[in-house]
Amino acid sequence: QVQLQESGPGLVKPSQVLSLTCTVFGASITMNSICWTWIRQPPGKGLEWMGFICAGVNTYYSPSLKSRTSISRDASKNQFTLQLSSVTPEDTAVYYCARGAQFSYDSWGQGTQVTVSS
């Protein structure tokens, strides 16, 4: 059974970099044809796909967030990381990591609340 766990600071100041880590248990993030995605849900809004990394190497980003988003991996820790730069209060959301891509996910983390505020 695959399990994912998000971790990172719950509060980030405006203009800073939001950095979150997803630790994966029960599957390798470097498996071919498997992708790992970051998704967020702002308060009162729907889910928003941010980007994903496939086979632990290839990355793809939402066009609306591409200029501020970076996803990387640490294969030795079986983790993948999200970095979102120049954050504003509009980046306040619950952030999820999930296995899958293209809006088809079979495993999710529990989500972590991130608030952008000074």
Image (cartoon, grey):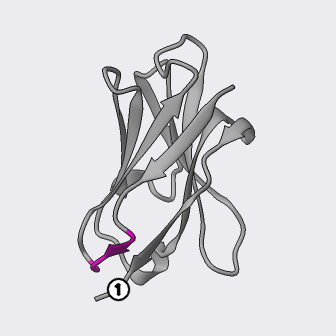
**Location of residue 60 in the rendering, given as x and y in whole percent from the top left corner:** 49, 36
Q: Residue at x 41, y 53 (%)?
A: 7
**Location of residue 44 in the rendering, given as x and y in whole percent from the top left corner:** 70, 81
The quarter holding residue 18 reads bottom left
Compared to residue 116, the image places residue 74 above or below, namely: above
Q: Residue at x 35, y 86 (%)?
A: 117
Per the picture, the main secondary structure of the magenta-coloured stretch is loop
Q: Residue at x 57, y 27 (%)?
A: 35
Q: Find disc 1 in the rendering and name its residue.
A: 117
User: Which quarter of the rendered picture does the N terminus lie within?
Assistant: top right
**Location of residue 96 in the rendering, given as x and y in whole percent from the top left corner:** 57, 53
- Magenta stretch: residue 42 in it? no
Mark 1 surroundings: few (<14), some (14-19) or many (≥20) residues within 10 A: some
The kind of residue on which mark 1 rests is Ser
User: Which quarter of the rendered picture does the C terminus lie within?
Assistant: bottom left
User: Which residue is farthest bottom?
Assistant: 118
Q: Residue at x 69, y 75 (%)?
A: 45
- Magenta stretch: residue 13 in it? yes
Near-viewer residue (106 or 2) = 2
Compared to residue 116, the image places residue 7 above or below, namely: above
Number of dots carrying numbers: 1
Q: Which residues are magenta?
A: 10-14
Classify mark 1: helix, strand or loop.
loop
Compared to residue 85, the image places residue 10 above or below, namely: below
User: Which residue is farthest top?
Assistant: 32
Horizontally, residue 30 falls left or right of residue 27, namely left
